[in-house]
Amino acid sequence: MIGNSNAEYIWVVFWVVVLHSIGPISVAYCLSSPFLPHYLQLPRYLRYWALAETAFYILTYLYQKYHLERPALHPLLTSKEERNRLFDLCLNTTHDHAHYLSKWFMDKDVSAIKRENVKEFFQWAFLNTDVIDPIHDEELDDYVKKLEARMGTEFEHGRTDVKSLRLTLDKVNALHRSLIWYMFYRASTWQSIAILPPRPHAFVASIRSPSEDISYWYQAHTSKTELPVVFLHGIGVGLYPYMEFLKELNQGRKEEDGKIGILAVEILPISSRLTSPILQKEEMCLQIRAILHRHGFEKFVLVSHSYGSVITTHLLKTPDMARTISSVILVDPITILLNQPDVAYNFTRRRPRYASEWLLWYFGSKDMGVAHTLSRKFFWSENILWKEDVLDHRCVIFLGEKDSIINSSKVLAYLQDGMQVTSKGEDMADTDCLRSKPRNPSGSLNVVWCSGLNHGQVFDLPVWRARLKSEILKEAQCV
């Protein structure tokens, strides 16, 4: 993640304009080329490039129209008791209910929102549908009454022309990028063929993943006194931004201490590639289980960044997988307080103003694979991570003070509730370590507050990578 200086703003916006313009300009040139005089014709190699860009522009348009816009396959509906429990948890973890509602309705004033609009939003949020069914009318009315009681007001009856953010029902909001962008960057052979940009190493690799859909980087585990590490990356360009961090985990170790094993999972649908859709929760856990079994990872430290916390949540909520996780380290997790509108709004609806927001907007949320993942495969109720979900484990959470996706101060306040500050970070003057009361003697919840840091900057700065490494090594020793 970059900063927000004027120079960085100009740099990011410049590349957004360039990469977004190449496709339309190429189409315009190819259409007009037969009518242009000789002196306005491009050199042959540029004409071939324009032709390739034009073909790619048309193909990605068709891909977006007919593949990305297919309706989401929502999870099966949970019981009414579970839905009521989830609704109450959402209410109890919200302090400003008017702001909460306004943000889900994309900054509309609460006075402009009527009763049927609220019911329509709850219908998506808790029933996973936009189809009106009278059988659920009483339940939705109860939700509205509970919200009215918290807000101390009543909504007007009827409906008005306001729209709420309903991520898996709304249009997939993706933008075309130039073919050259994808050229900047081993599951099964079929999966390797179906990836753009292509990955030639997938066809010559001698060892194939036990998973049909998931490739990964692997460092063999030889340490006798420490646990291996499983790493799950966030949205971006895959594992490349984490190279220094992964390399540094084993730096400075004595030969006799052995190596800490590292299994870094590649999640290609959120890595600026046009490939098959991201796996659903159950299939993702099943295939990761197969990979762990192949390498004998019976107990490990699970480290994840940003979107990786979604898969972490699924693993923690799958009992046999949860038992293999010794400790959890979450960096910039998007799944805590996912019931709040901040993550969905900031990543998919906010108009970018600063350099870091432009970077997230164009190179993150507008990527076709990312947009499809968030709009058709991202179900908040199964992705949300409550702090109670980690209290059976040792857990460390890194929160950036200036995170442009997560409302980190709100998440910190939620994690602090019922906790006490027990110690100060020795190497970071502005770092507080918060400890919860665990449900079992081996569990704990600690928060590292990263003063001045934006989303992802823990991995950019050597001093913070060192802090993260020290936490991982500390947890890896808890065998």
Image: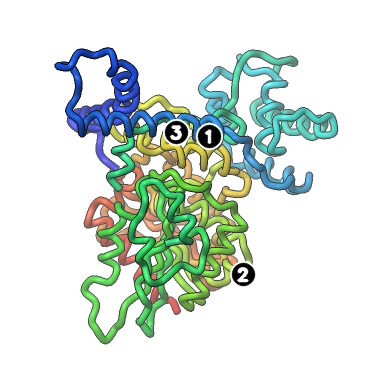
**Residue type, mark 1 in image:** Pro
First-in-chain label (3 vs 1): 3
* Residue sitting at the far left: 39
- Kindly report the distance in space between the C-alpha atoms of the residues bearing marks 3 and 1: 34 Å
Horizontal and vertical percent for residue 223?
35, 81
Q: Residue 165 vs residue 197: left or right?
A: right
The residue singled out by tag 3 in the image is 59
- SS class of the residue under badge 3? helix
Q: In this view, does 164 lie above or below 283?
A: above
The residue singled out by tag 1 in the image is 341
Residue at horizontal 53%, vertical 30%? Answer: 65
Q: Is residue 230 above or below residue 222?
A: above
The residue singled out by tag 2 in the image is 320
**Residue type, mark 2 in image:** Asp
For the rendered model, the colour scheme is rainbow
Horizontal and vertical percent for residue 402?
34, 40
The image quadrant of residue 439 is: bottom right
- Kindly report the distance in space between the C-alpha atoms of the residues bearing marks 2 and 3: 42 Å
- Kindly report the distance in space between the C-alpha atoms of the residues bearing marks 2 and 1: 31 Å
Depth check, mark 2 against mark 3: the one in front is 3
Can I make out residue 335 in this image?
Answer: yes
Q: In which quarter of the image is the C terminus?
A: bottom left
Q: Residue 379 vs residue 140: left or right?
A: left
